[in-house]
Amino acid sequence: MKNPPILTVKNLSVVFPDSNGGLHALENISFEVCPRDFICFLGPSGSGKTTLLRILAGLLKPTSGQVDFIHNQQPKIGMVFQQAHLMPWRSVMDNIKLPLELEGMDESQARIKAQEMVELVGLNGFEDSWPRELSGGMAQRVGIARALIHDPDLLLLDEPFASLDAITRERMWVELSRIWQVKQKTIIMVTHSINESLFLADDVLVLTQRPGQIKLEVKVDLPRPRNDDIRYTPHFGKLARKLRGAIE
Amino acid sequence: MKISFSRWLGLFSIIIGILGWGLIVRLSGLPRFILPSPLDVWTRLLRSLADGSLLYHTSVTLLEITLGLLVGVTLATVLGYMLAKSHSLEKILSPYLVASQAVPVVAIAPLLVIWLGHGIISKVVICALIVFFPVLVNTVVGVRAVPPALYDMMNSLRASRWQVMTKLEVPASMPVLLAGLRIGATLSVIGAIVGELVDAKEGLGYLLKVGDFQYDTSMVFVAVIMLVALALSLYGIVTLLEKRFLKWQNK
Ligand SMILES: Nc1ncnc2c1ncn2[C@@H]1O[C@H](COP(=O)(O)OP(=O)(O)OP(=O)(O)O)[C@@H](O)[C@H]1O
Ligand SMILES: [Mg+2]
């Protein structure tokens, strides 16, 4: 039995104005998200993945179609952007606790929570560093910590692990699965990586080249918790081939 | 080691300069009212310090500068922020702003003194006017340069307008704002002096003029030295602000 969807997207299209008739970024996208779902969007560059997340986050209005949240209210969102987008004038610690500050949590409590997040993403010892002193992967981990700290209902992740090295990336996969299971989050993630989507998601949606349309939906019926070995099972291979075939 | 050495270098250069000045006076035999010697200036400085006149006039000028900076910077940042946020307001106001910039403040200073009297108010206004434009321009540039991605980030967290301003726009534009303040601080000294030279009964500009009338050239030197000291202190304060607020920058 499934809960009613917390998010329903219907016939969503996005056209960016340009000089010749508009740039069609997304066309006729429909899908549903139930609480605790982990959904991955897989698609080539320029297929409108970031645009889709921006719409779900309320940062952009669709040209047509509907985005409806349950009870008609935007859930609390944690977003990880394709680039880290840190505030250069804030230390690692202060960047991570920004969402709590915005919620008005008191300073000492916010620091304790931020310290927990620092440990989660493995940045111990860098609490007082400036963003300019971090590597790309470290900055991205700060962005991930910032997206999780205020315990959002809906996580929107835009290729969050693309700039990490293979080992850290796989550690983050495991962490993210754990957080998702323990904290009962709903996650919508965008990625280029078939492995990543199969390792993490319940549902993988493949987008076509621009304008992005949903080309294929694959239910990932691999057992959880998933570990590294799962990648060498025949079923994983079958799903991977199916996705590979759908991506042009 | 290296730092203390270069600090000595600066002091050394000043001493050489003063000695050179003294030497020129001695060799050229110019009369005191054309070019006073360092010693003349020094004794004049001590005398005007002793009778309290120097500190009094310096404090008047300092008050004018402080008030002028306060008024000019406040108005410029508030208006600059609004201009940065509203393109239509910018369209409406920009002809006036550009025109006002084409009129040199020095030229309208006498007018302002006629209108506002030869008291402190006319100087504060001149000072504020001269400070206004560079601070305004830098505010607009600074606020417009806030990365759009960070607005997205703040909006995804449902930040209020006030939070966006205080936690994003103000700190993000701080480097450009302080650069504007640096220019403004230096100009404010000029503004106050221009006002005082037009007409005043007190202030360093007044001292300059009196020294000039009475062929008390040493006095003129003393006043100029005080002005330099004022300008340097203001500059130093802005530098301290930068140290405090921009320590995240790679310097
Ligand atoms: N604000 C905008 N104005 C105009 N065009 C835009 C805007 N944002 C995105 N686009 C266009 O929409 C299309 C989709 O962009 P989007 O960033 O969503 O792609 P993406 O799938 O995230 O790509 P990538 O994998 O490279 O990140 C692109 O052609 C892009 O040029
Ligand atoms: Mg993208």
Image (spheres, coloured by chain):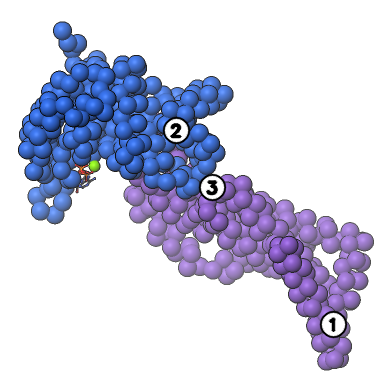
Residue B210 coordinates in the image, percent (x, y):
81, 71
Label at residue B33: none
Mark 1 closeness class: few <14, some 14–19, many ≥20 residues within 10 Å: some
Label at residue B22: 1
Q: In the figure, is residue A130 to the left or right of B126?
A: left
- Name which residue type carries label 2: Gly
Q: Nearer the viewer, mark 2 or mark 1?
A: 2
Report the Cα–Cα distance between label 3 and label 1: 45 Å
Tag 3 secondary structure: loop
Of the chain colours in the picture, the one used for chain A is blue
Residue B11 coordinates in the image, percent (x, y):
78, 69
Report the Cα–Cα distance between label 3 and label 2: 22 Å
Residue under pointer 3: B248
Mark 3 closeness class: few <14, some 14–19, many ≥20 residues within 10 Å: some
Q: In the picture, which quadrant includes the C terminus of chain B?
A: bottom right
Report the Cα–Cα distance between label 2 and label 1: 66 Å
Residue A24 coordinates in the image, percent (x, y):
11, 44
Q: State the residue in front, A132 or B213.
A: A132
Tag 1 secondary structure: helix
Q: Give me the chain letter of mark 3.
A: B
Q: Residue at x 89, y 76 (%)?
A: B39
Residue under pointer 2: A122
- Asked whether the residues under marks 3 and 2 belong to the same chain, the reply is no
Residue extending farthest to the bottom is B28
- Name which residue type carries label 3: Trp
